[in-house]
Structure formats: structure tokens, C-alpha cells
Amino acid sequence: PRHAPNTNADIISLDRQHVFHSWSQQGQLNPMAIAGAEGCRMWDFEGRQYLDFSSQLVNTNIGHQNPKVIAAIKAQAETLVTVAPAHANQARGEAAKRILARAPAGFSKVFFTNAGADANENAIRMARSFTGRDKILSAYRSYHGNTGAAIVATGDPRRVPNEFARGHAHFFNPYLYRSDFWASHEEEECQRALQHLRRVIECEGPEAIAAILLETIPGTAGILIPPQGYLDGVRALADEFGILLIFDEVMAGFGRTGSWFAFDLFNVKPDLITFAKGVNSGYVPAGGVIVSEAISHYFDDHMFYGGLTYSGHPLAMAAIVATLDTMEAHNIVDNAATIGNGVLATGLQHISQKHAIVGETRGVGVFHALELVEDRQTRTPLAADKMNQLKASLISKGLLPFIAANRIHVVPPCIVTEAEVQEGLSLIDQALGEIA
Ligand code: PLP
């Protein structure tokens, strides 16, 4: 029998020999070995513990190794571990029902995918089919996933309805701290960003545009809270030109902002909602599209040209059911709001006042960013070598951070406690002091 390797070096060596990693030059990797996790903590093979302030890729909203979710996955495995998507299965029906119960009025169906990227692929496909138009507008400061070629490479006839001659155009979204509109306050940023979007729509040809795809709160791009009125303005432009509005809630959804969906905070309703990550905290990969009544009704007698072998995989669905029920029963979304808008936000403000290296802190719920700069006047982003130094320092102190460009994204699980927030903030405070 094989002996389980049990040192960090064994695991890292196994990985480096055989595993090809995402978004990396393979020769320059230095992965951490993770042996186990629970709640907001993880540990390596030598007993070193880390406080997880990353929620991995901002997905373990319910925390690590939730016993209710694990039990539900085990029970589903014993009952029906896999099934083709064409069959009706209970777990998928129950998962869809629970997701719709949290969506606003006017949404009636859920299409399940394996993750966030294919959720966006399918929302785009629905929007194109529904409108008969093909262009998709999205923001420069955004991330929507990394697929894009498989159906066009496909040879069989399912390719044909998916071959769109024209594709994508981008616009600048509001970001007052680094305004692309020379704005000096939020209202100005908002008005100018909306005027710019109107011009992009006019120049791209409204009759050619199927949808505007927008992260409700851009996440990887920097946790950019839209100014008051922006999302309403986008909704109004979409309505004026007969364009659908897709909100990508993959990162912001399912508790991250202290509400079930980020758009709940803005009172704006999209036509399609994409989700993944927090819906079951990634215990089994899952994503999907929440479809409005009008679009869902259209597909009652129009073919939907999309599908996946594992759409609604029973293990993923059982994990969704247990995750949402547990989040509800334990008020986990409320916890994200209370802790996130309380001790976490206050602590980050305090850190930003203390360290000149912090240019701006922003966020909501357990979805915050510290934007680091060389100089507060020029706002020059903190140099990459200093960011690397900071990351290494945080890890050596026992904090697992989410670092993106010149920012620390402070994104612990939604179950984080006040004590864990204080502990994490104290480590960030120390590490920033050393860099400055
Ligand atoms: N949309 C957003 C807003 C995301 O943050 C991500 C991933 O980080 C995706 C889509 C893609 O999701 P996935 O990596 O599950 O395909």
C-alpha cells in the first residue's frame, strides 16, 4: 500500500512533479501545503495554523468543513451520486427552489452550471437568444471567468446557433479613487460614468447589444462599491435601449456583502443573475443562472442551445441545499453584515488612519479592500516587490491573505467571529508597519 506523504515538503514535491497550476509560470511556483481546515482556520502538515482571511478564492462563505454540509454530501453520495441532467432529481429541485426563494420577485427558474465562468457563458447565451442581438457590454474593471472557445471549436451542429459574428465591447465603470472621468466626487463620477456608458451604447449600436454584464460589486478588480445611483442608471439605460441586464453575483452573492445578493443593497433588479462560489462554498463545484420569468417563458417554446454533462450534479446540489439551510438557520448572512460593517470596517478605518501606505479602504460586509500606495498624494500603487514582501510577512504571521495587484482584499468567511477579526486585523496592522 502507498503511504500517505505527511510533510509539507512531500506534498509540495508531489505537486511540483505532477500538477499544472492556474495563472502561473510553472517554474516559479511556491505553493503552500494544506492538510486540513475548520471554520476560519487552515493548517499544514506540520501543525502550522493560518487564519483564512481569503475564503480561498472568496468562496468559502460558510467556512471550512461545515459538518452539516459534509453530512449532506455523504448522504447524497449514498443515495444517488450522479445522474444525467435530463432527469428530474430531488436535490436539484430543492436547490433551485431555495435559490429562487432568495431571489427577488419575478425570477422563476435556475439553470445550473459547474462554476462561475460557465454561468456567465450561459447567461450570455440566453441574452443573445432572447434578444436576437449579439454584442455584450462589460466593464474594463471586471472578472467574469476564463472559458470562451469550446462551443465555437465544436464541430457538430450545436456550434451554429452559438456563432456570433460580433462579440464584446467594454466600458469604464466608476472608481472614484482612480477616476477615468476626472471626477472629484461620487456624484460626478456616477453621472460621467453613466454618460460614458450611454455613448458606448450609441456607438456600438443599441440594436446590436444583447446585454450589459456587470459584477454588482466588482470583486477581483478591487471591491469597487458602485456610487449611489449608478446601478439604477445602468438599469434605466438598459431599459431605454431594450438591452438585458446581467448581474454577476459569483463573488458578491450568497452572503459576502451581508445580504443574500449584492444588488439587494441597491434595490435594482437585473434580468439574469449569475452565481457560483458562495452558493455552496465550493464544497462541490457549482454555479448557475437565475432566470427571470420573461426570459424563462421565452424558452418555453424556443430551443435553449446550451448544456453541460454535470448541470445540477447531485453532490453539488445537496451541498447547496445544506449550505443555504445552514446559513439561514445560523443567521450567517446577518453575521457577515454585523461583523463586516461593525468591527471589521471600523478596524480597517483605524488601520488606514495609522498607516500612510493605505490610500483607501472600502467595502461592505465581509468584502473589503485596503488599497496600498507609495504616496497618498500621487496614489502610485505600492510596488509589486513590496506587495510580495507583505504577502510573505502575513503568511509568516499566520494569516492567509487575498492579495490582488496593490490591494489586500479582506474577505474572511461569513462566519468569522469578532475575536478572529481582531486577530486578523492585528496581524495586518503589524505587517503594514513593517513595510512602511
Ligand atoms: N465572476 C466573478 C465575479 C468571479 O469573481 C469569478 C471568479 O473569481 C468568476 C466569475 C469565475 O468563476 P469560476 O472561477 O468559478 O469559473
Image: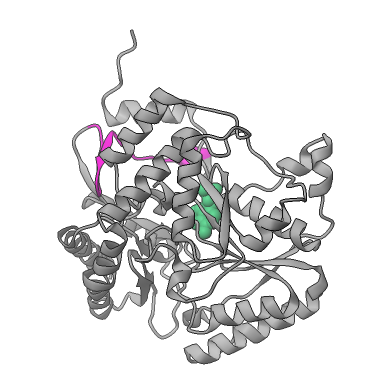
Vertical order, 10 against 277 (above or below): above
Spot occupied by residue 386 in the image (x, y as percentages of width and height): 37, 62
Which quadrant of the view contains residue 320? top left
Quadrant housing the C terminus: bottom left
- Is 43 magenta? The answer is yes
Q: Residue at x 82, y 35 (%)?
A: 155
Spot occupied by residue 6 in the image (x, y as percentages of width and height): 26, 24
Can residue 343 be seen from the camera position used here? Answer: yes
Spot occupied by residue 343 in the image (x, y as percentages of width and height): 21, 70
Position of residue 108 in the picture relative to residue 285 (left or right): right
Between 159 and 345, which is closer to the camera in this rendering?
159
Highlighted magenta segment, given as a residue range: 26-45
Tell me how many marks there are. Answer: 0
Vertical order, 265 against 153 (above or below): below
Query: What's the image's color scheme?
Result: one colour
Between 307 and 31, which is closer to the camera in this rendering?
307
Position of residue 413 in the picture relative to residue 183 (left or right): left
Q: Residue furthest left?
A: 419
Spot occupied by residue 133 in the image (x, y as percentages of width and height): 80, 63
Q: Residue at x 52, y 84 (%)?
A: 229
Vertical order, 436 against 164 (above or below): below
Which quadrant of the view contains residue 77? top left
- Is 165 magenta? The answer is no
Q: Residue at x 47, y 63 (%)?
A: 219
Quadrant housing the N terminus: top left
Can residue 33 be seen from the camera position used here? Answer: no
Between 50 and 411, which is closer to the camera in this rendering?
411
Q: Residue at x 68, y 75 (%)?
A: 238
Position of residue 42 in the picture relative to residue 370 (left or right): left
